[in-house]
């Protein structure tokens, strides 16, 4: 089982869109996927028409997670719903010892019981590096951070790298001095436009960056997927749509497959 969190300090860069579509793609390939909505905006939950306030991710931070609901939303996809009050949890847990390790402890408690059956756990985070997000980083094997193809993107990248390294050096086992952070931080260039001057410059600038592991094109179908609550994998089943966007579907399937292979290889 691999755990991947989608993290970015900046809002609107594609965290939910990528989590949703990558998760749906994995499920379509036959993998058992657990989606966790760790964003108080609850966008990922809304994609599945889930608006519950019971058994949400908040349980992990308030009640040790005994009452978390595992919602079967689709074949091969289970969801732990987001919590609109999750941002307050950041304040409520602030004085707790081990406040960054509450998710870690929950995972340990529930691994044998509930979590073992999942091939991939994908976590969609709020745009920040708050204590809640840090909890998600600590349990992850990978952090995927979508990046805008612009100068702002590079600033955001440096910003996240700094915070990530700081957490890595601070969240340590006090006895062994080993860090609880074992995740690899990887970036995904998102919304890269086709054949524009700026996109060419961007691609040139990142050519040798080992930590940018995917380049995802700007495509209206992504927008439609989040607006209409229909994943790219489902859209692809529409023969006409598939035919019309043949190249795009081929390229996105390849991008997702390469991502999955990288997750397994590293
Ligand atoms: N590759 C893409 N091509 C076109 N539109 C995209 C692409 N990726 C994301 N979008 C669109 O950008 C908008 C923001 O994406 P999304 O909601 O996934 O960002 P986010 O990082 O989760 O935002 P927030 O920080 O608010 O949670 C959405 O309307 C989405 O459909
Ligand atoms: Mg989001």
Image (tube, helix red, strand yellow):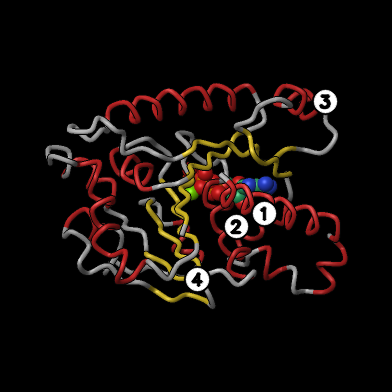
Q: Is residue 243 above or below residue 123?
A: below
* Residues at circles 4 and 2 in contact by the CB criterion of under 8 Å: no
Hey, which residue is sitting farthest front in the picture?
A: 176
Q: Earlier in the sequence, mark 2 or mark 3?
A: 2
Residue for point 27% across, 27% down: 170
> SS of the residue at dot 3?
helix
> SS of the residue at dot 2?
helix
Work out how far the residue at label 4 is from the one at label 2, CA to CA, in angstroms: 12 Å
> SS of the residue at dot 1?
helix
- For label 2, being within 8 Å of ligand 1 is answered no
Q: Which mark is residue 256?
A: 1
Side (left or right) of 46 relative to 147: left
Residue for point 18% across, 32% down: 174
Which of discs 2 and 3 lies nearer the camera? The answer is 2
Q: Which mark is residue 77?
A: 4
Q: Earlier in the sequence, mark 1 or mark 3?
A: 3
Q: In the rendered image, which residue does mark 2 sit on?
A: 22
- For label 4, being within 8 Å of ligand 1 is answered no
How crowded is the residue under tag 3: few (<14 C-alpha within 10 Å), some, or many (20+)?
few
Q: Earlier in the sequence, mark 4 or mark 2?
A: 2
Image quarter in which the C terminus is found:
top right
> SS of the residue at dot 4?
strand
Work out how far the residue at label 1 is from the one at label 3, CA to CA, in angstroms: 26 Å
Work out how far the residue at label 4 is from the one at label 1, CA to CA, in angstroms: 17 Å
Residue 112 locus on image (x, y percent): 31, 68
Q: Is residue 12 above or below residue 254?
A: above
Q: Which mark is residue 197?
A: 3
Q: Earlier in the sequence, mark 4 or mark 1?
A: 4
Between 208 and 233, the residue placed more toward the observer is 208
Q: Earlier in the sequence, mark 1 or mark 2?
A: 2
How crowded is the residue under tag 1: few (<14 C-alpha within 10 Å), some, or many (20+)?
some
Q: Is residue 212 above or below residue 115?
A: above
């Amino acid at each position: 089982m691999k755990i991947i969190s989608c993290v970015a300090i900046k809002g609107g860069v594609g965290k939910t869109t990528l989590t949703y579509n990558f998760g749906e793609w994995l499920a379509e390939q036959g993998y058992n996927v657990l989606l966790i909505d760790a964003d108080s905006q609850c966008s990922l939950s809304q994609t599945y028409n889930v608006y519950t306030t019971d058994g949400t991710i908040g349980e992990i931070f308030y009640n040790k997670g005994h009452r978390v609901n595992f919602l079967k939303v689709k074949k091969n996809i289970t969801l732990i719903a987001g919590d609109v009050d999750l941002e307050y949890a950041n304040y409520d847990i602030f004085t707790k010892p081990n406040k960054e390790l509450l998710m870690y402890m929950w995972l340990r408690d529930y691994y044998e019981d509930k979590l073992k059956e999942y091939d991939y756990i994908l976590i969609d985070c709020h745009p920040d590096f708050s204590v809640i997000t840090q909890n998600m980083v600590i349990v992850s094997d990978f952090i995927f951070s979508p990046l805008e193809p612009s100068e702002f993107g590079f600033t955001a990248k440096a910003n996240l790298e700094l915070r990530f390294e700081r957490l890595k050096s601070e969240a340590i086992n006090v006895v062994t001095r080993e860090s609880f952070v074992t995740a690899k931080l990887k970036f995904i260039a998102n919304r890269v436009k086709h054949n524009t001057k700026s996109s060419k410059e961007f691609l040139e600038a990142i050519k040798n960056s080992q930590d940018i592991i995917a380049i995802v094109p700007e495509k209206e179908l992504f927008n439609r997927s989040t607006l209409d609550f229909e994943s790219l994998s489902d859209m692809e089943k529409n023969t006409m749509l598939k035919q019309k966007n043949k190249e795009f579907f081929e390229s996105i399937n390849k991008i997702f497959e390469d991502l999955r292979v990288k997750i397994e290889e590293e």
